[in-house]
Amino acid sequence: MRRVLPEALLAAVLTAVLAVPIFGLRIHVDGIDVSLDRTPTPVIVAVVVVFLLRLFQEPLRAGWARARLSITWQHPLADALRRTRRQPGYRALPWTLLLIAAVVWPFTASRGAVDIMTLALIYVMLGLGLNIVVGFAGLLVLGYAAFYAVGAYAYALLAQHFGLSFWLSLPIAGALAALTGFLLGLPVLRLRGDYLAIVTLGFGEITRLLLNNLNVLTGGPDGIGNIPRPTLFGLEFGRRASEGGATFHEFFGIDYSGEHAVIFLYLLGLALVVSILFVIDRLQRMPLGRAWEALREDEIACRSLGLNPTVIKLSALTLSAVFAGLAGAFFAARQGYINPESFTFIESAMVLAIVVLGGMGSQFGIMLAAIAITALPELAREFNEYRMLAFGLVMVLMMIWRPQGLVPAVRPRLELPERSEPAP
Amino acid sequence: MLKLDNVHTFYGQIEALKGVSLEVHPGEIVTLIGANGAGKSTLLMTICGSPRATKGSVFFEGQDITHKPTHVIMQCGLAQVPEGRRIFPGLTVRENLQMGGFFADKARLETDLERVFTLFPRLKERRDQRGGTLSGGEQQMLAIGRGLMSRPNLLLLDEPSLGLAPIIIAQIFQILKEIREEGVTIFLVEQNAHRALQLADRGYVLENGRIVLADTGANLLANDEVRKAYLGG
């Protein structure tokens, strides 16, 4: 106690110093009079909380550790769960249920909620894509928004100038983003760690500035508007069909509702996410996926086995760019309008945060984190001012308690059927 | 099979190999001994093309491989077991081995796995365990097994006895003998001169980037200078 008390007092004083200017003073404007209000209550609360937490840090930690231990090892429920998971039939069950829930959900939810979830799905795609380079191959790429922008602008420009439909543009957007990733990777992947991060950061900014200043092609800061919405086998979701087109509600003989378009976009996003998940899952089981992980763990060993590190890194970056391109095209289709402001560094940082928060290499964790990061701020709009504060706090807490992410990565593995002979 | 002709290698300004020539014949176990910093590891790495020899040439099975990129060299029948084992700690034993057979015919993979498991029964017991959870000796076995997965004609080993208990070292050297009997030529770099020379048909002594002695293993073991410098009198 003698050792802890001064420490706790010091922490409380520091909190007071930090909290007084932020929480303790408020500018009060009354006509032309400006005065400073003192609001001591939040400061006192903060100081007391910090003081107590600091004082009882040791017992709290011990209690936490004990609680965790009993849950993970001794709980019969955990045991039962573990046993069911082993059975092959049950492994796919949670995923199937989740998918069914995700498909049914938009028909019951409000229009706004569905729209926000569609946005979350875009971030899921981006997170899954970035996870390939950051989580699997271990390359820190900070300019991921550039590939996203390439995809979005590819669709917008193709639709504007050549009248290409969303479905035709989607693979082209993916291919163009892949090409960008490939061309960037050729010179850049010789760099390692921090240097790679810096160069890709620069690349992201260059792309944004180009989009901003190439007025002739991209419309500059004004962006591109009137991007056509995706259609369902040629059926449009507007109130009236364009020339020679047909609308969804007329074709099926139902009343027009704005919700159809929103739900369709959501389901389209979901389909994209599911197919991306499927592709990544396959890749992970292929030798290429294993090579990414091996490269992350030991580059020299990989070289000694005859692998060419540049080619493997290049494949990771190119594939990951494809998914960003697809997400970008979908984003452009959803917004109907894009400008360079949507592809700033913050966007790259958000996606990276999703990957780190979810657990590098863990697909499920990334989905959770993407939904949390996009959906929660929308739900709690009143606390908008504190968004970045909360974001920072969450990141710090995560690094302390769960540096491996919300749902740590579990590597896919094949288990041999148990033999009748006794285990060694 | 392997021939180095007057090879010079530089790290920046520092000349680590000052004209090394040596030869390894098919079916032999050849060892290279020397003190810390003599250039033993540099020599092995130069064979693999990283760092590249600035002067002289390296021949493997009659082919000049001096200027080929590392990944090409490593795919032409040569396998390296790097210093410090360098297994992939996050991958399972089986996956580590599969990485070794990355370029091998997929149909051969299972046979090759079985072959490694026969040589190292311990690895079979632990095939689904992560590489990082193995003991030092098991990791060394895994590194050797991984090297064998590409069915090399020549196996390069960099200090396989590093940091291992004497009983494990004895096991590993026994296995090297078995590997040779299967027809794999072995070039072994060692600090544990006594054991290496006992095993080897021929040996080279490297000092300050130069080969100072070359003889049969038995003769080197009996050599007074070698005894004094490397075998503790």
Image (cartoon, coloured by chain):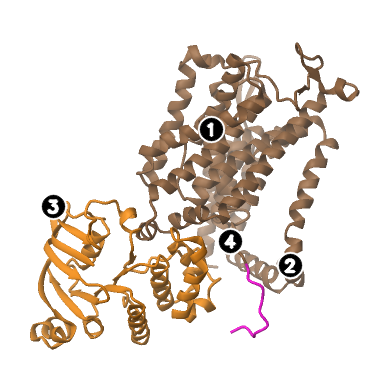
Chain colours: A brown, B orange
Mark 3 or 1: in front is: 1
* Residue corresponding to mark 3: B13
The answer to whether residue A60 shows anywhere in this view is yes
- The magenta stretch is A415-424
Distance Cα–Cα, label 2 vs label 1: 40 Å
In the image, what residue type sits under mark 4? Leu
For the residue carrying disc 1, how many other residues have a C-alpha within 10 Å: few (<14), some (14-19), or many (20+)? many
Name the N-terminal-most of marks 4 and 1: 4
* Residue corresponding to mark 4: A55
Quadrant occupied by the C terminus of chain A:
bottom right
Q: Which mark is residue A87?
A: 2
Name the N-terminal-most of marks 4 and 2: 4
Mark 4 or 3: in front is: 3
Q: Taking A88 as reference, is B193 left or right? A: left
Q: Are marks 4 and 2 in contact (CB under 8 Å)?
A: no
Residue A237, given in percent of the width and then of the height, sits at: 78, 22
For the residue carrying disc 3, how many other residues have a C-alpha within 10 Å: few (<14), some (14-19), or many (20+)? few
Residue B155 occupies quadrant? bottom left
Q: Is residue A421 magenta?
A: yes
Distance Cα–Cα, label 4 vs label 2: 47 Å
- The chain letter for the residue carrying disc 3 is B
